Image: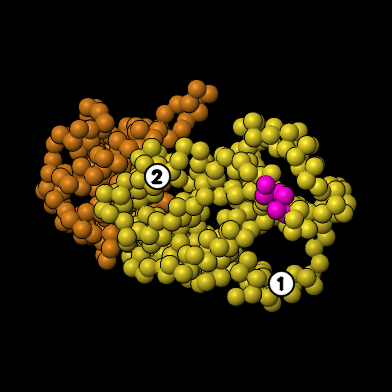
Chain colours: A orange, B yellow
């Protein structure tokens, strides 16, 4: 299945390495265990149906992929998410078109850094998009042809 | 397909066979259906730009991609960008007179050349033309009626279709050559459906009595079980969603294309 391809295919690639991605910030990036405890990450894992028993390996793959992106972006998952929103003049939270464009470019950069191509590349980027989508950032993924 | 079945079968289809192009003739039928829609003042409201994905140069296709349209643009082989032209009022006097000449608008209902020239135009239509809110309201309403015909024409021909909002960016306007007086309404996606035509079942609707009234607004329309039964047999009222297999269907399609789960 695609999941194992994404996680396994990346191995010790550039994405798992340092910050250098022109990221959303310079805050220390939490490790995978800490990332798994962040509320938006928990929500994501629940909504993709991986919160329960029997999904440990797949769940770990999801968190590992998000952590790799966070390292690439130089930001924690909350900061990544916050960069997609802005406050309106009425104090409401709205999706920032600029922030969404920037994070989309960052996802593309992250995927490129993984050295993946074709379907694997699209799936890897869409894994990160999935985290944003389940937390209210309207966006669409790239189609990965079988 | 029978009219009632077309209405009942229409869904917002979001999964298309990206490999299967849509015949140009079928697109033309969709445009003709919109052309023959009801329209006030006999005015030309809608404008549409048909974009066949596989005929586009790569750079133009790339320009149509943005963070909110990526999957739609890749999955649907045809996009129809619907607009209305803010200048639809121009020439409306002549078009109304055509209806008088055809006896569609006749003295029996108060119509005459003199009424159009001396009253309707200066006192009503000219004022609408100068009032942006009225212009927008009528333009959007009347174009919506045309688009409804376009949707049903797609369904009638076995196609899947869906309306999607779109960002009328300056880049897109340049690519499509959109004049500045055109106001964006909807992007209509068209293609052969990859999902089951039932698309997980009919979407929820409020009860008749919550939406419609008889005589006055305090008297809800009473739904007739016999009519409901007939419409079920005719296909206008279908099995409500979600059908038991829908979640699995979406999951499988999502994985087929590696889209975000």
Query: How busy is the neighbourhood of tag 1: few (under 14 within 10 Å), some, or many (20 plus)?
Result: some
Above/below status of B40 relative to A83 = below
Mark drawn on residue B231:
1
For image coordinates 21% across by 58% down, the residue present is A118
To which chain does the residue with label 2 belong? B
Using the rendered image of the protein, determine whether residue B56 is visible from the camera's viewpoint.
yes
Element type where label 2 sits in the image: loop
Q: Which mark is residue B177?
A: 2
Question: In the picture, which quadrant includes the N terminus of chain B?
Answer: bottom right
The answer to whether residue A91 is above or below residue B147 is: above
Q: Which of marks 1 and 2 is in front?
A: 2
**Residue B108, quarter of the rendered image:** bottom right
Do the residues under discs 1 and 2 have CB atoms within 8 angstroms?
no
Most prominent secondary structure in the magenta stretch?
Answer: helix
Q: Does the magenta stretch include residue B180?
A: no
The secondary structure type at the circle numbered 1 is helix
Q: Nearer the viewer, residue B172 or B165?
A: B172
Does the rendering let one see residue A131?
no
Q: On the rendered structure, is B226 left or right of B50? A: right
For marks 1 and 2 on the same chain, the one whose residue lies earlier in the sequence: 2
Side of B60 relative to B94 (left or right): left
Q: Position of residue B46 (x, y in %)?
A: 56, 50
Boundaries of the magenta span = B94-99
Q: Nearer the viewer, residue B125 or B25?
A: B125
**In front of the other: A83 or A105:** A105
Instruction: Answer with the quarter of the image where residue A19 lies.
Output: top left
Q: Which quadrant of the figure contains the C terminus of chain B? A: bottom left
Q: Mark 1 lies on which chain?
A: B
From the top left corner, tell me how far across and down residue B148 is, in percent: 60, 57
Give percent across and percent down for residue A6. Answer: 22, 56
* Mark 1 and mark 2: Cα distance apart in space: 44 Å
């Amino acid at each position: 299945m695609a999941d194992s391809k994404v996680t396994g295919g990346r191995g010790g690639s550039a994405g798992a390495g340092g910050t250098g991605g022109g990221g959303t910030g310079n805050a220390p990036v939490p490790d995978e265990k800490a990332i798994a405890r962040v509320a938006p990450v928990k929500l994501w894992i629940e909504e993709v149906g991986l919160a329960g028993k029997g999904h440990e390996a797949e769940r770990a793959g999801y968190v590992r992929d998000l952590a790799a992106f966070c390292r690439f972006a130089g930001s924690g998952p909350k900061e990544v998410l916050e960069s997609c929103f802005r406050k309106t003049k009425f104090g409401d939270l709205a999706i920032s078109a600029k922030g969404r464009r920037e994070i989309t470019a960052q996802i593309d950069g992250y995927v490129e850094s993984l050295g993946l191509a074709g379907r694997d590349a699209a799936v890897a980027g869409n894994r990160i998009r999935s985290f944003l989508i389940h937390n209210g950032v309207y966006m669409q993924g790239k189609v990965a042809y079988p | 397909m029978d009219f009632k079945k077309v209405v009942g079968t229409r869904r917002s289809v979001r999964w298309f066979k990206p490999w299967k192009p849509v015949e140009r003739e079928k697109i033309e039928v969709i445009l003709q259906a919109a052309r023959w829609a009801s329209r006030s003042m006999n005015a030309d409201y809608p404008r549409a730009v048909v974009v066949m994905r596989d005929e586009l140069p790569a750079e133009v296709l790339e320009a149509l991609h943005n963070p909110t349209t990526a999957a739609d643009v890749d999955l649907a082989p045809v996009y129809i960008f619907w607009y209305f032209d803010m200048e639809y009022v121009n020439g409306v006097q002549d078009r109304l007179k055509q209806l008088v000449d055809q006896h569609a608008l006749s003295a029996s209902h108060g119509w005459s050349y003199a009424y159009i020239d001396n009253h309707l135009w200066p006192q009503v239509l000219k004022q609408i033309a100068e009032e942006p809110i009225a212009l927008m309201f009528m333009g959007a309403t009347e174009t919506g009626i045309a688009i409804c015909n376009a949707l049903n024409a797609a369904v009638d021909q076995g196609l899947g279709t869906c309306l999607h909002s779109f960002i009328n960016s300056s880049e897109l306007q340049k690519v499509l050559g959109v004049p500045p007086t055109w106001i964006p309404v909807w992007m209509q996606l068209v293609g052969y459906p990859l999902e089951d035509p039932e698309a997980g079942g009919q979407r929820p609707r409020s009860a008749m009595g919550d939406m419609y009234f008889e005589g006055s607004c305090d008297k809800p329309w009473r739904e007739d079980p016999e009519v409901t039964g007939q419409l079920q047999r005719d296909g206008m009222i279908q099995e409500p969603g979600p059908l038991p297999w829908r979640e699995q269907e979406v999951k499988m399609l999502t994985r087929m294309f590696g889209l975000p789960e």
